[in-house]
Amino acid sequence: MRRDKTDSFGRIRDMAKRKREKASQPKGPLLPRFIAYYKPHRKLFILDMLASFGIAAIALVYPILSRFVIRDYIPNQDYVAIVAVAVIMLVLYVARMLLRYFVQYKGHVMGTRMQAKMRSDMFAHLEKLPYSYYDENETGRIMSRMTSDLQDVSELAHHGPENFFISGFMLIATFIYLMTLNWIMTLIIFSIVPVVIFITARLKKRMSEAFTASRKSIASINASLENSITGIRTTKAFDNAEEEAKKFEKSNRSFILNKSRAYKAMGQFQSQTAFVTDLFNVIVLISGALFMAGGVFTFDVLVAFIISINMFISPLTTLINFTEQFEDGVTGFRRFIEIIDTEPEKDDPSAIALSQVKGAIEFQNVHFHYGENADVIHGINLRIEPGEKLALVGPSGGGKTTLCHLIPRFYKVEQGAITLDGTNINLIRMDSLRSAIGIVQQDVFLFDGTIEENIRYGKLDATMDEVIEAAKKARLYDYIMGMPEGFQTQVGERGVKLSGGQKQRISIARVFLKNPAILILDEATSALDNVTELLIQEALDELCKGRTSIVVAHRLSTIKTASRIAVIAGGVVKELGSHEELMQKENGIYSSLYKLQFRADETGGTLPDDYLFE
């Protein structure tokens, strides 16, 4: 039977792995999804393209007028016409200056707005992703996609259509104009274009792979940097700055290697295409001289070819140089789409909202594992009555916190079910379910802001009186009022300006303000000193009144008053009962552990967390 279950979970893991691999692939072609971000800016985009068209059209006027000046006005000494051409060109160049200003200014604004929309979409989607996504993806890597990657996409959004449009128009217009001068020489010159296309196609894949690897190395640097800065106090406490530098240098060397490969591919591409484009000048000079010597065309035509060929080479060079930016932008957009296409948390179509929550929770043959790891929860059956205080004790890694995370659907149960007031939690809307649950954890996270803002996070529309009342219940009010700025005191990043006990009380005040029907306390006092623990325990005891409470505890003395105590080890319930009932089991796990811990407390010794659970 056990083997059948193991095989079943193995198949589930294989399916999950294939699902993740499939999810990392973009859903559909990228181009239509990229173009969709232009739609809110259609007018600005059209104006930008018209301005680009004007810039390109003005560039074509110069070789045409130059030919008239050389062929007609200079031989005829028509000074008025020469001055008129100069005035016309001056006016056109002033107009081109203004058009370039518009393209550079408004074009970049459009790109920035598109970037902002993508960033908003990514942030909104990240908020909907499950816990498991953040288990597998580092914060620094996510931030890299939201910042540097989207900056590259923004540049592509602005310069991409502009470069393709102007360069494409210039190439076609120059070709048509040169064909009117001499079609044979034009075809000779343009015969080199297929060579450029061949080189581009041959090196494009190599460049794409190199720039993708380069992007990943930048993300790795950001992840390493974010991790080191976040843990800077631990680094200093253990005097391990040199070790952190080694870790960072490892990512840095990977960045140099991948960036070098990217630039090598780019160098090969640019040098080879530049060599081919240089041949244009040689071909124009030699073939033009031969045609002119043979009387095929006159000097003014040769000059027009020499001027026009530079107009042809310039957009071609622009497209070549644009390749790096294009690859960066496409890679950045692909990485953006990977996040957008990641499956978010979803409610069942028939999910309902809770009305009045009583707080009856039942685990029915619940199984769970993280990713491809071994099973953490093995067929747990457990019922918690409304208003009951259930304590969970056991070794680290035994499944206590996992059980708590399954209730608000931070992770989905793979087999079995969890019900709330008789309804499967998968059939309850997540916002409704989570609004009914309050969580106080050992590791408290505070947002950079004031004490008031962090307490109010429990109920964003709370009045100041409600905030004050919550602070009083959390035994925090007197401390706050003793500070010069009171509730407006800044807590610093992650609450760094406060002590562990102060942060814990703010988190308790948040839950008081939220006033949930169900309360989860996940080792909320285990990291505190005895005096602070007693103070906070009073607040927690008051918080538990009238609520279904699940308390994960390390110190057994703090859960003696629990209605029942469940000993969790190896993902199963080993023992279940009240403190008195479990203490009556002479050789029971809980009674043995309690006696040893009590003895350790008296003698000042310590007791391993996994003692008697191996």
Image: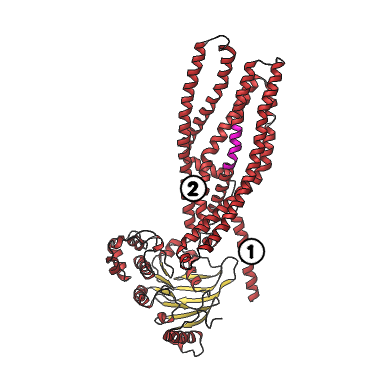
**Residue at position x 51%, y 12% from top?**
81
Q: Can residue 347 be seen?
A: no
Was residue 319 drawn as part of the magenta stretch in this picture?
Answer: yes
- x, y (%) of residue 156? 54, 41
Return the residue nearer the eye: 379 or 115: 115
Is 117 in the magenta?
no
Q: What residue type is labelled 2?
A: Met
What is the C-alpha distance between the residues marked 1 and 2? 33 Å
Q: Nearer the viewer, mark 1 or mark 2?
A: 2
Q: Quadrant of the N terminus?
A: bottom right
Q: What residue type is labelled 1?
A: Asp
Q: Quick one: SS at disc 1?
A: helix
Q: Nearer the viewer, residue 355 or 34?
A: 34
Q: Mark number for residue 14?
A: 1
Q: Residue 537 at x, y = what percent? A: 36, 76
Q: How crowded is mark 2: few (under 14 residues within 10 Å), some or many (20 or more)?
A: many
- Find numbered disc 2 in the image and state the secondary structure of the residue it sits on: helix
What residue sits right under mark 2 in the picture? 118
Look at the picture and state if 367 lies above or below 22.
Answer: below
> Which portion, as a residue range, is magenta?
315-325
Q: In this view, does 569 lie above or below 174?
A: below
Residue 347: % across, % down: 49, 60
* For residue 573, side relative to residue 385 (left or right): right
- Residue 353, x across and y down, in percent: 43, 62
Are discs 1 and 2 less than 8 Å apart at CB? no
